[in-house]
Amino acid sequence: LKDRRDYVAYNLNYLIADGTIFQSSWSKRKNLEMGLSSNSNEATIYNAPNSLIFNTNSPRIFDHTAKTKIIATSWSSNWKKGFEVYKWLDENLDFNRYEMAFIGNSPIEFKNIVHKEPMNSEKLSFELKRNDIFITASQSDPCSNSLIEALHCGLPAIGLNDGGHTEIIANGGEVFDNKKDIPRLLEKIIIDYQGYQKNISLHSIEE
């Protein structure tokens, strides 16, 4: 193990813990591959946001005749949070067809994407609900909080086919391996927007 914290956690799990909770099936699989001992009591429980804030109250009505509004968020400015993809979108997305906003900390300056500074949960929820589709390109993310916040607000999502994105998005969006596929996936969601929206299926924090 490269990170000593993993070594400590794995030993505590083996010597002390009666059960292990994983944030996603991807996280479980990867940890077992890295050497975590299987526990007799194991469960996968996804993250969930505050349902009083991140919810489908006062939803935005999708308008096929207007520009489709895309949003991405990240507190961290680490390049692995997807900034290579966001930079490509900034340079290649058809901004006559789309609008895109990024909320959070960024290591790059955008030319076409509207960059807004980090904000509290209430303001973030308001901003999410003003958009149509969420995009995340974060790498090896076991259970992205920004993704689940957007899905709980009713936004179909497009995510990098990595980490827990694929199982969390499920039928509520699409995943990509190549960033050049994103425009095609955007159009696919636009064609059946309500269908994707209805297919969003996540447990609430109360559940």
Image (cartoon, rainbow, N blue to C red):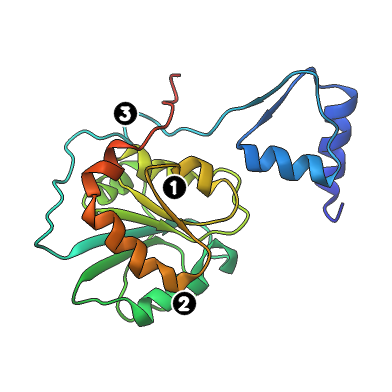
Q: Residues within 10 Å of mark 3 (few under 14, many from 20)?
A: few
Q: CA gap, disc 1 to disc 2? A: 21 Å
Whichever of callouts 2 and 3 sits on the residue coming sooner in the sequence is 3
Q: CA gap, disc 2 to disc 3? A: 33 Å
Whichever of callouts 1 and 2 sits on the residue coming sooner in the sequence is 2
Compared across the picture, whether 32 is left or right of 77 comes to: right
In the rendered structure, find residue 193 and report the number of the disc placed on it: none
Label 3 or label 1, whichever lies nearer to me, is 1
Amino acid, disc 3: Leu
Secondary structure under the numbered disc 1 in the rendered image: helix
Q: Residues within 10 Å of mark 2 (few under 14, many from 20)?
A: few
Amino acid, disc 1: Leu
* Residue farthest to the left, as pictured: 65
Q: Quadrant of the C terminus?
A: top left
Q: 96 or 87: nearer the eye? A: 96
Amino acid, disc 2: Ile
Q: Label 2, on which residue?
A: 108
Estimate the x, y position of residue 188 in percent, counting from the top left: 30, 58
Residue 116 visible at all: no
Q: Give me the residue at 24% from left, 53% from top.
A: 132
Q: CA gap, disc 3 to disc 1? A: 17 Å
Q: Label 3, on which residue?
A: 52
Secondary structure under the numbered disc 3 in the rendered image: loop
